[in-house]
Amino acid sequence: MSTMNISLPDSLKSFVDEQVSQRGYGTSSEYVRELIRTDRDRLHLRSLLLDGAASPLAAPVDDAYFDGLRERVRHRARG
């Protein structure tokens, strides 16, 4: 694992220390790693949503679409 040192103003350091103790993290590094993973996941989701919004419509989303989707889910659950 690589090491990265960061500098924080006292107010942010205090905030990180509070989060570590209140939210059950073992170290400030665990807390920062979780923040970075969450941001990475958020960016990935944003990219997927933007790709989806830019893609052409494949079929209308109506009652028949959702009925078919429910049936496929039921079929796989029995599976």
Image (spheres, grey):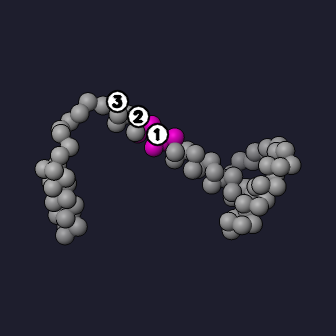
Relative to 27, residue 47 above or below: above
Which residue was labeled with disc 2?
50
- Mark 3–mark 2 distance (CA, rounded to whole Å): 6 Å
At 71% from the left and 47% from the top, the residue drawn is: 2
- Mark 2–mark 1 distance (CA, rounded to whole Å): 6 Å
Residue 59, by quadrant, is top left
At 17% from the left and 46% from the top, the residue drawn is: 62
Crowd tier of the residue under label 1, counting other residues whose Cα lies within 10 Å: few below 14, some 14–19, many 20 or above: few
Relative to 23, residue 3 above or below: above
Does 56 sit left or right of 1 as displayed? left
At 58% from the left and 45% from the top, the residue drawn is: 39
Answer whether labels 3 and 2 touch (C-beta < 8 Å): yes
Q: Any magenta on residue 35?
A: no
Which residue was labeled with disc 3?
54
What amino acid does circle 2 point to?
Leu
Residue 14: x and y in percent read 82, 55
Residues in magenta?
Answer: 43-48
Dot 3 falls on a residue whose secondary structure is: helix
- Mark 1–mark 3 distance (CA, rounded to whole Å): 12 Å
Q: Residue furthest left?
A: 64
At 73% from the left and 55% from the top, the residue drawn is: 29
Which residue was labeled with disc 1?
46
Answer whether labels 2 and 1 touch (C-beta < 8 Å): yes
Residue 55: x and y in percent read 30, 31
Does 7 sit left or right of 35 as displayed? right
Residue closer to the observer: 29 or 22: 22
Residue 27, by quadrant, is bottom right
Does 37 sit left or right of 48 as displayed? right
Q: Residue furthest front?
A: 63
Crowd tier of the residue under label 3, counting other residues whose Cα lies within 10 Å: few below 14, some 14–19, many 20 or above: few
Dot 1 or dot 3, earlier in sequence: 1
Dot 1 falls on a residue whose secondary structure is: helix
